[in-house]
Amino acid sequence: MRNEKILSLFLVMALILTTLVGCGKTQTTPVSEDTTFTVALSSDIISLDPAFAYDFTTNQVVNQITEGLLTFDSNNQLVPLLAKDWKAVNDTTYVYTIRDDVCFSDGTPMTMDDVLFSLERTKDPATGSYVQWMFGSVDSITKTGDWELTVKLKQPSATWQYVFGTTAGHIISKAYYETNKAKFGTAEGGILGTGAFKYDSWKNGQEVVLTKNDKYWDKDVKSDLAKLIFKIIPEDTTRVTALQTGQVDFTAEPPLDMMETLEADTNLNVDGVETMGLSFLAFNTQRAPFNDVNVRKAIYHAIDMQAIHDNIVKSAGIQGTVLPNGSALYTIEPDRWNSYLEKAPVYEYSLDKAKEYMAKSSVPEGFDCNLLTTESSLRYSEALAIQEALKAININVELVKLSSDEHTNYQFGGVMDANGKRDYDMILAGWEADYPDISGNIEPLFASANAGADGANAAAYVNPEVDKLIAAQAASTNPTERNDLVFQALDIITNEVPYIFVDYPIKQTVLNEKFTGFTMNASWLWNLYFKNICLKA
């Protein structure tokens, strides 16, 4: 039986803590010191820094530590997070009211200085943030009240509204950053955020450990988790074994060729959700011979995309078309999108047509090239199929298998050759629209960034007319006008084929059946949270 004096002291201390404005809360759910939730990642993360959280593994970790001004709910609609509310005053002015009761995980209050610093740091090209491009339309970000923030745009933007729901809107501690600037976001430097979990440790290539943030501001969050561990398990069979033995409780990266095994395990719950993403083969259009449209069309006709879908992708995705988006992004006038697709070009599998295009190309006798891929069993299997298919038209493909972080660096233009061009011929990669809008795919994949074709434009595609059309639709707030402009751009793009869209992925997850409280939707890149995970009663 507890000592009454100790119990009284505990109650007094709890009462004092609840009176501290914005710096903590009373623990409403008992937490066992050994209640741990373990997540399997297929590769190591890039950084703990949200400015560089822009991939499927890094975001799973960073989203638990730092938070944005807004987030997406289960219906992919924007809702407040660190901002209480927001409004569009006009087409170029957005006002955000920031919460005044938020603390970082060390107990220090989040201030407007932290908010402004975080946004300006990500916006600054010198930072090199992977999401810096999202601020391209911003003229200014200013404090216009004690807890009010105003964003002025250079011109209207149909998609600005979504930006603060991504890691571009995540807030870090300014003081912590300035103290740890040299190693910020690394295993040694760590990070300080407002999320439901706080950083504990990161053993590169092995695991990232987070612990419960007892000072988390959102009193509606109730979780049994005291510790959150991310295990880096690149090998597919090992990852599945860890799930089946209970060493791992969750993964958003199950190996597709072992899904039947996972689905048959009664201790695991398998689920799937249609995403806003796509998988693609990108041609480096700034490097010969891939700057020749005849070569690109020859390759398209030489690959049996139906066979790749039926034998490799299977239930992991919906077979791709010439469009850079599946039906999940038919969010504006869906009937028009279906009609457009019916009339769009079809590059069916035909070796005869492939050989005709090769004969018209700059390299009719064929050539040698490389294809970058990842350690993912799905991607590598697709790469093998492409390699084999292109032998029929005398294209000899060397496969280059990279780790996820290496691959991401190449995909986003971080590695250049001696001529300042992307240092690959072709790359198999994926893209997830940053928001539920067609611009989430059209802009990053096809806009040439002032003809530099950097960033997410993995094909290094440059077409001034397409640039104009993309810019015009992005600045329009008229849905019909936007689609008119997008379809004009697609008329050009589908003829020039800088990419082959392999599939529109279905994101599958596996969860240990002893846990509950996890939800996932198409916006999972930004709102995959573990803060509501609980043990089943």
Image (spheres, rainbow, N blue to C red):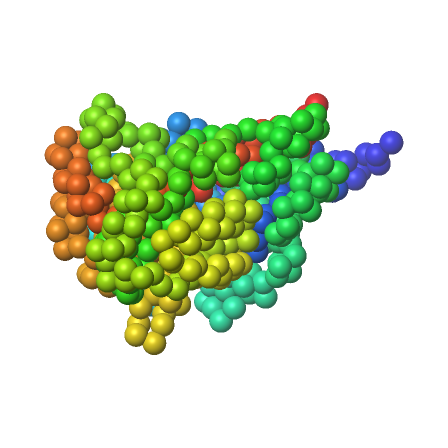
The structure residue drawn at horizontal position 35% and vertical position 31%, both measured from the top left corner, is 328
Using the rendered view, name the quadrant where residue 225 is placed.
top right
**Pick the front one: 13 or 140:** 140
**Pick the front one: 50 or 240:** 240
Q: Is residue 319 left or right of residue 377?
A: left
Q: Is residue 454 visible?
A: no
**Pick the front one: 370 or 105:** 370
Residue 495 at x, y percent in the picture: 20, 45
Residue most toward the bottom?
418
Residue 171 at x, y percent in the picture: 42, 51
Residue 399 at x, y percent in the picture: 48, 59
* Quadrant of the rendering where the C terminus is positioned: top right
Q: Is residue 371 visible?
A: yes
The structure residue drawn at horizontal position 71% and vertical position 36%, both measured from the top left corner, is 244
Q: Is residue 54 left or right of residue 285?
A: right
The structure residue drawn at horizontal position 33% and vertical position 30%, both measured from the top left corner, is 327
Question: Compared to 2, does 232 lie above or below?
Answer: below
Residue 140 at x, y percent in the picture: 22, 55
**Pick the front one: 286 or 117:** 286
The structure residue drawn at horizontal position 52% and vertical position 68%, both measured from the top left corner, is 183
Using the rendered view, name the quadrant where residue 166 is placed.
top left
* Quadrant of the rendering where the N terminus is positioned: top right
Number of marks drawn: 0
